[in-house]
Image: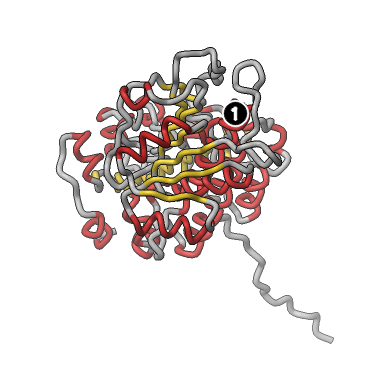
Amino acid sequence: MNAPTPLEQLAATAVASRKVSIGLPASQSESEKRFPLTPEAAAILVDRGFAVRMEAGAASCIHYSDEAYSRHGVEITDRAAALRCDIVVYLPAISDADAQRLKRGALLLSFAHMGSRTAHSLKIMLQKSVTAIALDRIGDTSGNHPFADILREIDGRAAVAIASSLLADSVHGKGILLGGIAGIVPCEVMIIGADIAAKAAARSAIGQGATVRLFDNDVYRLREVADAIGPGVISSALHPKVVLSALRSADIVIGSRLRRPFEIGADAVAEMKRGVITFDIAPDRAPMFPSMPTVDLALASPCDNSTECVRRVCYINAGNAVPRTAAMALSNTLLTMFDDLIACDSAINALKLIPGLREAAYLFYGKPVSAEAAHILGMRPVDINFLLQFS
């Protein structure tokens, strides 16, 4: 009987695939306390196959420990390792030293902050062929800006929440509630601007029982806010006499974004009552209250706003006073964006296929592709559509 002849059999092989890494360096900007990802959001990215690396202590600004992230598969590293990742999410303007640490060909996701960027850091990123995208300028097919809009909504809600707390303070404020008490005239909240932040502020103030007056010269925006909120908001065009009358009686004044610059001058500020709480939540614009000293809520505690205090101040950076809420909102939006990156298979394909992402890029493979970045560099901008044709 013949012995069985052994036959060849295919052996199972495994092809190792390198995970795309996401770096989360700690913010070194004193005026930027927000952080892009919560531990739960980082866990979802790890489950989707990303390698997430976070600088030790980076999430302390939103009161999360390193251990909360490492439990979900996040690697806790030093700053250099977080900056050497394929994708780096760093919200402030990056410094020259950090730009030098970026990996060649990396994708940098940050806020625009064009006024804070240096030509040197941009040149370093050009030399490293870094693709840089401003998160707050990413748009969608409906004309919305998911990152900017949610942060603006937080700004409006935070401004009213903080102002309400300051008014209720019996030592440094007036010791009063915004409203909602039978037999007591409610406080007056004056909002200048009718954008998404103003709408959020108006909703919050009305919810606390205040009388809300909202001003804008764009009648269509005023109508949109009135339709969304209902008859609880009193809307008006920016007529000088009507504005001055509202300023004299307002307990809280909030300046938001207008289509055209608008200022409340020193003479009008002098007409405001003592103890008034003033906020400017319009981003990247000339100040609405130029004569008033500002208090950045990312850097300092609120001041004495009691009726005995003659000095009036204007609070800015309201959203940075609630960084954990901002982190949760940013996490939701970033997860959606990473879904798009996965669906498109690469950042370059995403830029080709998603117009809103393409329009938010300011550097692409060694070229400035936005007018602002090119101006800082002293160069001419290059059309990103032209560069993508050859990528």
Residue at position x 42%, y 36% in the image: 246
Say which residue appears at 49% left-offset and 20% top-offset: 274
As shown in the figure, which amino acid type bears the numbered disc 1?
Cys
| Residue 287 appears in the figure | yes
Q: Quadrant of residue 383?
A: bottom left
In this view, the residue in front, 218 or 3, is 218
Element on which disc 1 rests: helix
Position of residue 67 measured from the top left corner of the image (x, y, whole percent) = 72, 33
**Residue labelled with disc 1:** 61
Q: Residue at x 60, y 28 (%)?
A: 61
Q: Residue furthest front?
A: 183
Colouring of the image: secondary structure
Q: In the rendered view, would you say 79 is above or below 107?
A: above
Position of 50 relative to 326 (above/below)? below
Q: Position of residue 221 (x, y in %)?
A: 38, 56
In the displayed structure image, the side of residue 316 where residue 46 appears, left or right = right
Q: Residue furthest bottom?
A: 1
Question: Quadrant where the N terminus lies?
Answer: bottom right
Question: Vertical placement of 365 versus 317: above or below?
Answer: below
In the shown orientation, is residue 226 left or right of residue 94? Answer: right
Q: Is residue 140 left or right of residue 44?
A: left
- When asked about the image quadrant of residue 240, the answer is top left
What x and y, as percent, mark residue 202? Answer: 52, 46
**Residue nearest the viewer, comparing 337 with 349:** 337
Quadrant of the image occupied by residue 266? top left
Instruction: Mark 1: give few (<14), some (14-19) or many (20+) Cα within 10 Å.
Output: some
Tell me, yes or no, if residue 121 can be seen here.
no
